[in-house]
Amino acid sequence: MPALLDGKVVVVSGVGAGLGRSVAVRGALAGARVVLAARTESRLTEVADEIRELGGTALSVPTDLTDDASVTNLAESALAEFGVVDAVVHNAFVQPPHERLLDTEFESVRRGMDINLLAALNLTRKLAPALEKSEGSVVMINSMVLRNQLPNFGAYRVMKAGLLALARSLSVELGPMGVRVNSVAPGYIWAERVQRMMEKQAEERGVDPSVVYDEIAAGTDLRRLPEPDDIANAVLFLASDLARAITGQCLDVNCGHAHH
C-alpha cells in the first residue's frame, strides 16, 4: 500500500515549532513533497532540514501572508518547483488579546482578521487553479473556541467562526471543480504555548504544573490533551484520498473536550 500522500505536493502555511512543524514533518513521512511557508526563515530552515534528514523533500518560502505580493510569490514558487499543488493547509494565526471583545482595541481585531481569516482566503484563491487541476484538498486549522463559552476569547471566536464559514463557502464553490475544503478544530494542544500557559498558572497558584494539566484534562473524555501529531494525523487524513468523499466538514480533535 503506498504512503498516504505519496508524491503529492502539500503547502503548509504558518510553519513553526508546534502544529505547523508536525503537519509538515508527518506530511513528508507520509510521502508528500512539502512547501513550507512562514515569516521566520530560520524556522523554515530548521523544519526543512529535519524533513531532508528523514529523506523527504521540502521547499522553504519565507512569506508574509498579509502581503499580497508575498502570497503570490509563495504560490508561484511552489508551482515553479513542483509543477503541481495537491493540498494546502492553513495553519497561520496570531493570538488576539485575551480580554473582553467590548474592551479589545478595534485595530487589533482588524489585524487579527488579516492573518486568522483573510490570509487563508487569499492563498486559496491564488492556488485554486492548481488545486482544480489536481482535484486537490484544502484544510483549515480552526479551534475548539467554536464550541465553548470561555470568556475573553471573543475576538478569537469571531475570527475562527469566520474561518469556518469561509471553509464551508469555499467547499460550495470549489466542490464542482473537484476540490475538497475541510476544517480541523483542535482543543488545547499539548505543545510549547499551552505548556507555558500551564506553567504560569501553576506558578501563580504555587502548585506543580501537572496539577493544572490534570484539572484541564479532567474536562476531556480521554483525560488527556491532544499532541501536535494527533492534530496533524487528522489534517493529513483530510488532505489524502482516503477522505475523497469528505468536504465542507469540521473535524474536532480535542480528546472529547467538546462534542459536536
Image (cartoon, rainbow, N blue to C red):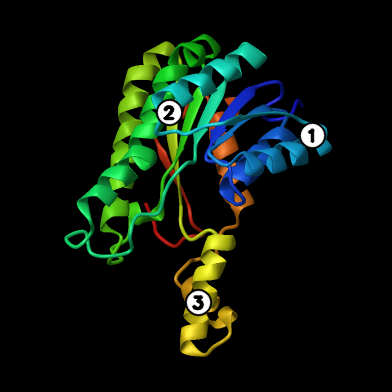
Sequence order check, earlier mark of 3 and 2: 2
Q: Is residue 79 above or below residue 172?
A: above
Which quadrant would the N terminus be assigned to in this image? top right
Q: Which one is nearer the viewer's eye here, 6 or 197?
A: 197
**Which labelled disc corresponds to residue 200?**
3
Quick check: marks 1 and 2 in contact, CB under 8 Å?
Answer: no
Tag 1, which secondary structure?
Answer: helix
Q: Residues within 10 Å of mark 3 (few under 14, many from 20)?
A: some
Residue 190 at least partly seen: no
Mark 3 vs 2: CB contact within 8 A: no
Q: Of helix, strand and loop, which one carries label 2?
A: strand
Instruction: Give the left or right position of residue 209, taking residue 183 as reference.
Output: right
Left or right of 182 in this view: 192: right
- Which residue type does callout 1 highlight? Arg
Q: Which amino acid does label 2 sit on?
A: Val
Q: Is residue 22 above or below residue 216?
A: above
State the residue position of label 1: 52
Residue 139 horizontal/vertical position (percent): 48, 34
The residue identified by callout 2 is 181
The numbered disc on residue 166 is: none
The residue that appears at 43% across and 45% down in the rendered structure is: 93
* Residue at x-position 55% and y-position 13%: 134
Please report whichever mark, 1 or 2, sits nearer to the chain's N-terminal start: 1
The amino acid type found where label 3 is placed reads Lys
Few, some or many residues within 10 Å of mark 1 (<14, 14–19, 20+):
few
Find the distance from the CA under tag 3 to the CA under tag 2.
37 Å
User: What residue appears at the point 55 percent right and 30 percent down from the top-left corner?
Assistant: 239
Determine the residue positioned at 47% across, 19% down: 72
Q: Residue furthest bottom?
A: 206
Image position, residue 15 (x, y; %): 58, 41
Is residue 61 in view from this perspective?
yes
Instruction: Point out residue 174 in the picture as x, y percentages from the top left corner.
Output: 38, 18
